């Protein structure tokens, strides 16, 4: 008789006296799959045979191959956990495929277009300049595809199993997901499925489906001649700026009087002015009533309220629209996950509720990134995923992300940089008498000889007698690259006196932050 193999791949000793050599070989093979445990985690040993008929087990199972999920998976693998990533689309998530990365490429192109207006002021002859959306799109898409391959190679190098398909939690006693008819489980399961653009139904706005979302923006094959952007958040601001600067006649529809209303009012007011100064038609106190298709393009019907006339409503239309883009927010990507089966709590908007350690209401299930609805930024998801991995697989029980003082940039024209509390938030939390504001506004030296002008505005929010800097806000040329260094200083607890003691770098815009009075 010979040793037989069970579904688990383990050898069954049916006749210990027969075929001792074969038994020895099989035992050695088994021993090679076992390694030392570290902090209670079996290193590279829990991943069972994926072709087996039962549930495949890992140490760490990640649902979502975006920024947060990949960061957590790779760090867990580095720490010895047998890890798998489940992804239904392309690796990299929103950021790489339809977010930060391709958006920044488009913004870079728009910056080139801006500078073209200034070339003659600097002595360059730039006649007969032609822009090709098609060439830019082809290069941008090739770059994104290259990043997809790099992400896959990185997973392979880290010996992380990649599972293609949609994950759905099952009703099994222990947390288990099913993908393409196969079941997978782990003592630690991370949900990092991100978010997606919110859309309006036909009942809410007749003809809403004739528009596109920010995802659809990256599918446009040519530059629209006439664009309408709906929304007042950073995505709406960025999309409107890109399209307008590259040559599309653009309108921005906002419900109130300014964009970026969650930002410091100093920034919100200035950004709204910059949009208007750049030639974007900003429709304030307005919303879309309906959309219809004509032989000359879309016709967008608007309702505008006049606050000076008791909110009297006026109906207007924008005709011959090539591109209607809805940028009205984002929603969590949890459809089809069946998280209710696991008893995972969500808020009223569907975001997964987590504590400060990314724990959900179900032990052994965690969530990071946009699906949690907090600080919807790629670096935040990455940091949270890595912190979680260190807590679970390196025994660092206090490892968690500090969500305070998170810097962010809006790639508007010119760009915005902001970190920490707004003036309004500081007054609410500390009291107006304990808040001191420093701000300035000036024309950057770059525009000293250009006919096109754009201001740079800067603001410091300080609290207490020591004037600790708790907020820094700016918009102007170079503010996107300027912010990171100042964020380090603020995170370290810098005071206004620390800023004042720092020697200025001249001539730069950033020197204004250390010379404010």
Image: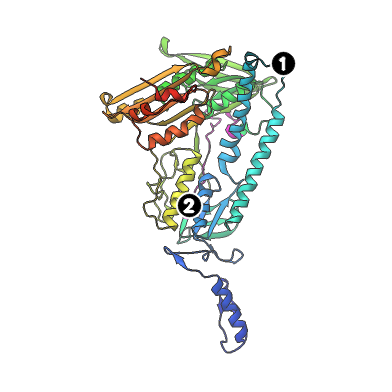
Q: Quadrant of the N terminus?
A: bottom right
In the shown orientation, is residue 470 left or right of residue 273?
A: left
Q: Residue at x 48, y 52 (%)?
A: 190
Indicate the position of residue 143 as horizontal and vertical percent values. Answer: 66, 39
Q: Residue at x 42, y 52 (%)?
A: 343
Using the rendered view, name the quadrant where residue 268 is placed.
Answer: top left
Indicate the position of residue 368 as horizontal and vertical percent values. Answer: 46, 46
Indicate the position of residue 153 as horizontal and vertical percent values. Answer: 63, 52
Callout 1 crowding tier (Cα within 10 Å): few <14, some 14–19, many ≥20 = few
Q: How is the image coloured?
A: rainbow
Region of the chain picked out in magenta, as a range: 189-215
Tell me if residue 143 comes above or below residue 73 in the rendering: above
The disc label shown at residue 35, or none: none
What secondary structure is marked by label 1? Answer: loop
Which residue is farthest bottom?
Answer: 17
Using the rendered view, name the quadrant where residue 40 is placed.
Answer: bottom left
Q: Is residue 40 visible?
A: yes
In front of the other: 47 or 334 = 47
The disc label shown at residue 190, or none: 2
- Earlier sequence position, callout 2 versus callout 1: 1
Callout 2 crowding tier (Cα within 10 Å): few <14, some 14–19, many ≥20 = many
What secondary structure is marked by label 2? Answer: strand
Circle 1 is placed at which residue position? 127
Using the rendered view, name the quadrant where residue 267 is placed.
Answer: top left
Indicate the position of residue 42 as horizontal and vertical percent values. Answer: 48, 65
């Amino acid at each position: 008789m010979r040793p037989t193999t069970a579904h688990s791949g383990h050898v069954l000793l049916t006749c210990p006296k027969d075929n001792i050599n074969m038994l020895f070989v099989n035992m050695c093979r088994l021993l090679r799959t076992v390694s030392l445990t570290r902090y209670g985690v079996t290193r590279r040993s829990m991943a069972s045979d994926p072709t087996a008929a039962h549930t495949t087990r890992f140490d760490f199972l990640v649902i979502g191959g975006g920024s947060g999920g990949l960061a957590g998976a790779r760090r867990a693998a580095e720490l010895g956990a047998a890890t798998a990533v489940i992804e239904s689309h392309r690796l990299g998530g929103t950021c790489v495929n339809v977010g930060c990365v391709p958006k920044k490429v488009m913004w870079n192109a728009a910056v080139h277009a801006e500078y073209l207006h200034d070339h003659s002021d600097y002595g360059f002859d730039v006649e007969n300049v032609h822009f090709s959306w098609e060439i830019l799109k082809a290069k941008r898409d090739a770059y994104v595809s290259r990043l997809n391959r790099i992400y896959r190679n990185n997973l392979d190098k880290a010996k992380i199993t990649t599972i293609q398909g949609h994950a759905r939690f099952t009703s099994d006693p222990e947390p288990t997901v099913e993908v393409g008819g196969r079941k997978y489980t782990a003592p630690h399961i991370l949900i990092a499925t991100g978010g997606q653009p919110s859309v309006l139904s036909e009942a809410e706005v007749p003809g809403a489906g004739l528009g596109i979302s920010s995802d659809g923006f990256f599918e446009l094959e040519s530059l629209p001649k006439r664009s309408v952007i709906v929304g007042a958040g950073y995505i709406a601001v960025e999309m409107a700026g890109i399209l307008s600067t590259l040559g599309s006649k653009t309108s921005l529809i906002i419900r109130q009087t300014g964009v970026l209303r969650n930002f410091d009012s100093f920034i919100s007011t200035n950004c709204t002015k910059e949009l208007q100064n750049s030639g974007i038609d900003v429709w304030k106190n307005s919303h879309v009533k309906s959309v219809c298709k004509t032989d000359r393009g879309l016709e967008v019907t608007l309702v505008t309220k006049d606050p000076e006339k008791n909110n009297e409503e006026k109906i207007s239309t924008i005709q011959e629209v090539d591109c209607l883009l809805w940028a009205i927010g984002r929603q969590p990507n949890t459809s089809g996950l069946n998280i209710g089966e696991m008893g995972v709590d969500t808020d009223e908007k569907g975001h997964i509720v987590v504590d400060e350690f990314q724990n959900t209401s179900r032990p052994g299930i965690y969530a990071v990134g946009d699906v949690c609805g907090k600080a919807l930024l790629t670096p935040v998801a990455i940091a949270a995923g890595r912190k979680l991995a260190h807590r679970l697989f390196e025994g660092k029980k206090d490892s968690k992300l500090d969500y305070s003082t998170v810097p962010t940039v809006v790639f508007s024209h010119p760009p915005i940089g902001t970190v920490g509390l707004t003036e309004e938030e500081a007054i609410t939390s500390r009291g107006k008498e304990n808040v001191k504001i420093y701000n300035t506004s000036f024309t950057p030296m770059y525009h000293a000889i250009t006919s096109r002008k754009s201001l740079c505005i800067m603001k410091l929010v300080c609290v207490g007698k020591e004037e600790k800097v708790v907020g820094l806000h700016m918009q102007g040329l170079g503010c996107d690259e300027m912010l990171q260094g100042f964020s380090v200083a603020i995170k370290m607890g810098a005071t206004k006196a620390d800023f004042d003691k720092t020697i200025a770098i001249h001539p730069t815009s950033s020197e204004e932050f250390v010379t404010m009075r």
